[in-house]
Amino acid sequence: MESTEIVMDRIFVTPGHINLWTDGAEDVDLRLLFPEKIPNSVSSLIYNLRQLSSSLDQNLDTTTAQAFLIDTIGIVYQAVVLELDEAARRTVFQFIVQRVAAAEDDAAALLVFVRFEPSHHLACQATWAYLKSRQASFDNPMAATRDLTKLLTEGEVLNRGAVFAGLVCFGDRRICSIARTIRNILSPAEVRSFALAVTLGPLHLPSIEFCLTWLVDLVNRRQFEVAIPLASAMSAMVVKDSALLVHENDYNFGPFGFGSATSYRKIRFSDLLVELSPILDSLSHTGNTALDQMLEIFMDPGSSSLDQLERRRAEGRRNKSERRASDRRIVDLAPHIERRAANRRGDERRLEMRR
C-alpha cells in the first residue's frame, strides 16, 4: 500500500459549506484534522480511490475490476463513517474534491460520497461536486446527470432523497427536466430526506418551479403523504435564505465540466411570488395544513426559522405516533376479550362440576 503521506497534501476548504464554483477558499492542512496518525480507514479509502482512477485511465472492464473495486470502496467507506463524524468526513471529501480538480483523481472518486454517505448535506454536496467535475463529450453533455439518475433508479444510493436534492438544487433547468422523469421513485421517507438536504445553497428559479409543479401534481393525485414533506422542503428552502434572491443561471456543459455559468437575472422572491400567483392560488384551496403553512411562510419568510419548522415536523410526527399507538391498544383488546369469553365455563359445565 502507498504511504499515508498521500493525505498530507494541502487542500482548500470553504468555511461553513462548500461553494464549488467560487474562489477565495481557505487553505487548510489535513494534518490539523489528523495531527497524530491518519486513520487506517481514511488511508485505505484514499488508496482505493487512486486505484479506481487508475483503472478508469487504463479503460479496464467496468464489469470486473472496477465493479469489485467499487464494492471494496463501499465497505471501506462504511468504516470511515463509523470512525469519523460528519465534519471530519467533510474535510476528507474536500480533499478528494481538490484532487479531482487537480486531475490527480477521476471524478468517479466523488461518486463514493454520492453513493455511500448518510449525511443529507454531504451527499447533496457530493452530487454538486460530481456535476461540476465530471467531464463529458460535446455529444453527451448531460453525462454526469445521466450517471446520477441511473444510480438513483437502480437503487445504488444510500440517501436517495439527498442526492435527488443535489440534482434539483444545482439550479440548472436541464438537470431539473431530467430529474422530473424519475421523481416518482422517491418514497415519503426519501422526500423527507430531500427536505433536509435542500437547505444548502441559494434559491434557484428552476428548482422552485420544479418543486411547485411537482407539488401541484401530487395534490391533484391526492398523494399527500409525499406532498406534505415536499411542502416542508420548500418552506425550508425559503426560510434558510436570508437574501431571498432567486437566481437563474445556465451552466456550461461539455468536456470541461461546469467551470462557469451564465447568470441571466436575479429576482426578489417577493416579485417571483407575483409571477407564480396562479399556482400558489390553486394550492391555497387544498385545505391541507402543511400547504397552508408553506404559503404563509412564502408571504412572510421572516416569521419562521428552521428550528421552528423542525419543531412543527416533530410535533406532527409525535401526534401521529400517539394516534397510532392508541389505535393499536383499542384493536388489541378485541382478541383478549374473545379468548376470555371462550374460556368461561358454560352453565351446563358448572352444574356438572357441582354434582
Image (cartoon, rainbow, N blue to C red):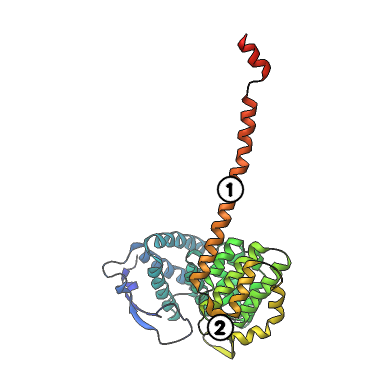
Circle number at residue 168? none
**Residue 87 at what x, y percent from top left?**
39, 70
Foreground: 262 or 3? 262
Q: Nearer the viewer, mark 2 or mark 1?
A: 1
The residue indicated by pointer 2 is 255
**Residue 342 at what x, y percent from top left?**
65, 27
The residue indicated by pointer 1 is 326
Mark 1 residue type? Ser
> Which label's residue is closer to the chain start, 2 or 1?
2
**Residue 204 at what x, y percent from top left?**
58, 82
Q: Residues within 10 Å of mark 2 (few under 14, many from 20)?
A: some
**Residue 323 at what x, y percent from top left?**
59, 52
In percent of the image, x 68 and y 85: which residue is there? 275
Mark 2 residue type? Pro
In percent of the image, x 63 and y 67: which residue is there? 289
Does dot 1 land on a helix, a strand or a loop? helix
